[in-house]
Amino acid sequence: MNVTQEQLKLKLTQALVAAFGTDYTNTDPILVAASNPKFGDYQANVALSLSKKLGKQPRIIAGEIVSKLDVSDICEPPEIAGPGFINLKLQTSYLEAQLNSIQVDTRLGIPTAKNPQKQIVDFSSPNIAKEMHVGHLRSTIIGDSIARILEFCGHDVLRLNHVGDWGTQFGMLITYLREVYPEALTTANALDIGDLVNFYRKAKQRFDEDPIFQETSRQEVVRLQAGAEDTLHAWKLLCEQSRQEFQIIYDLLNIELTERGESFYNPLLPKVVKDLATTGLLEESQGAKCVFLDGFTNREGSPLPLIVQKTDGGYNYATTDLAALGYRIQTDKAQRIVYVTDEGQSNHFAQFFQVARKANWIPDDVELVHVPFGLVLGEDGKKFKTRSGDTVRLRDLLDEAINRARADIEKRLQEDGRTETEEFMQNVAEVVGISAVKYADLSQNRTSSYVFSYDKMLSLKGNTAPYLLYAYVRIQGISRQGNIDFTNLGINRQILLKEDAELTLAKHLLQLDEVIKEVEQDLLPNRLCDYLYQLSDKFNKFYENCPVLKSEEPARTSRLMLCDLTAKTLKLGLSLLGIKVLERM
C-alpha cells in the first residue's frame, strides 16, 4: 500500500470511529483504486459492508462517514455515488507536492521494509556435467528479479545456487572417463563442456545397458562419498569445468549467485534420517526408510511415502532438500525461504515441506514459499526445442537474441543514414538482446507457460523491453536536443500539473511503491513489468500532447522535471528486473 493509500485508510478509520464508535477501530474501509478515472482516484466501499450490521442503507452510512471524514489536505471534497461508494479524487496540489518531494530522492520515495528479514532465494540450479538449457532460463531470470526486489526493499538476501553436483551421475561419468579419457580426471580443462556433455550421455547409455559398468559406477560413488583422493580430485575438476561455463552465462545475464550444491549437505544426510526416526515419523517400506504423507496417494489409492533413505542406503533429493532446509533455518537464520523452480516440482515441494512441518522443524516465524513457473514454448505451442528436437542450449538462445538485435540496429542505422562505432553497436545489441529475453519472460505471469518469439520480444512496439528502453532513450534525447542538465534545472524548480496527460502521468509515477510492495509479497515480477509498460505508454502520450522544449516557463521546467522523474522511475524499475538502460539506441 502506498503512502497516499495509507493516509487515506487511516483517515477513513478515524471517520468510522467518530461516526459509529470505537467498536469500528479495526473495520477495513475497503479502500481500492477507482476502476474509472472519471469517478476519482480511490473508492471506499465500506458503507455497503456495514449496511446489515448498522441496519441502515449504505448511502446513509456513507453520508455519516463523509460527515466525519477530513481529507482536505489530500483530496477534493468526497462524493457519494451509486448505492454508497465514497469516491476520492486527489488534489492537484497534493500530487505536485508528492512529485516534488520524490524527485530528489534516490529511492523515489519508496520506503524500506518496516521489519527487514533474512531471506533466501534458491534459483537457477543447473547440473554439473550438463549445459544450461532453456529449462534454466525462467528459474534464473525470475529468481534474480525476485532477489533484486527483496534486496531493494531492505531485506538481507542470500542468493543460493543449489547445483546438482553429487550422486550417481558422477560415479558413472568418472567410471566412463577412466576408460576413454583418463586425462580429464587429472588435468584441469582437458575437455570443453560440449565434450563433457557428450561423454555424460555415453556414460548414461552404458549405465542403462551394462550391469557390470553399473556396479562399477556405484562403487565409484561409494569411493567419492568416502573421500578417495583420486575420485575426489576428478570430481572437483569436473565441477570446476562446469562452473566456468555457467559463469559465462551468469556474466552475460548479469546474475550474482552463491553456489552451495547438493554436496554441501551430504555430511548432514544421516542426521536427517536419525532426526526423523526420533520424531516417530520414519517407517520402513520394502526396505526403504520413508515418511508417509497426508493427501498423497499412489495409483492404487494407497498412501504415498516420501523416501528419505533407499534400500541400498543411498539418499534421495528429498533428503538433501530436508538437510538444506534445516541448515538454512538453523545456521543461516532465514525467516523466508523462496524456491524458484518449474511447476512440475510442485508436488516435491509440497511433500518435503509437509515432512518438515510434521517433524516440527519449521518455527512459526519462518515462511517457506515455492515459486512455480510454466514452460517456455515454441511458436508451435509445444515445448521449445531445436529443429532437430534437442533441448535448446541457453548460450545459443542468448547469442541468437543478441545477433538478431544487432541485425536490427544495423538495419535502422542504414535507414536513418547514421554511422556508429562497432563498440556502440555491439553494446546496444547485447543490452537489447538480453533485455528482450528477460522482459519477455518476466512480463508473463510466471505461473503460465509462454510462447518464445524473437520477433515479438525484439519489437519496438507493444509490451516489450525495446519499447521501454526507447521511452528512456527518448527522454535522454530531449536532454541532448535541448542541452539540458536534468541535475541542474534551477533553484526554484517545481512540477506544476495543468494538462490531463500530465495528471495521468503524475498519478502513475506515484504508484511505484504500491507495485513494489505487491511484488515483495506475492513474488510476481510481471506486476512490475505491467507498471513500467503503462508508464512508458502514459509518458509517450504526455510527450505527444505536451510540448517540452518548446513550451514557455514555468511549464517548460515542470515538464522537464516530469521527463526526468519518468526516466528515473524507468531506470529503477528496469534495474529491479535485471535490465540495463541505454542512453542512445
Image (spheres, helix red, strand yellow):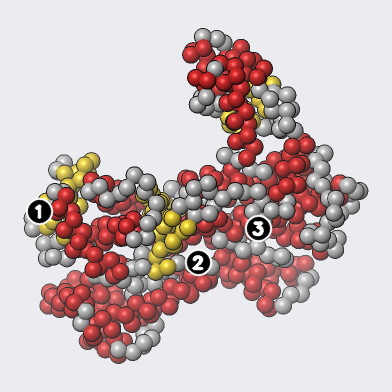
Residue 42 to residue 307: above or below: above
| Quarter assignment of residue 208 | bottom left
> Which residue in the protein does label 3 denote?
571
Q: Which disc number belongs to residue 284?
A: 1
Horizontal side of residue 196 vs 526, given as left or right: left
Q: Nearer the viewer, residue 577 or 453?
A: 577
Q: CA distance from mark 2 to mark 3?
A: 18 Å
Relative to 65, does residue 364 appear above or below in the rendering? below
Query: CA separation, marks 1 and 3?
Result: 56 Å
Residue at the spot x=58%, y=71% of the render?
403
Q: Is residue 396 visible?
A: no
Say whether residue 490 is left or right of residue 467.
right
Quadrant of the image for the C terminus?
A: bottom right
Examine the rendered structure and indicate whether residue 164 appears above or below residue 449.
below
Check disc 2 and report the residue beneath it. 255
Amino acid, disc 1: Glu
Residue, far top: 55
- Give the percent coordinates (x, y) of residue 8: 63, 31
- Camera-side residue: 127 or 497? 497
Q: Which SS class for mark 1?
A: strand
Q: Which element type, helix, strand or loop, lies under badge 3?
A: helix
Q: Position of residue 338 (x, y in %)?
A: 40, 53
Count the marks: how many?
3
Position of residue 119 in the picture relative to residue 276 (left or right): right
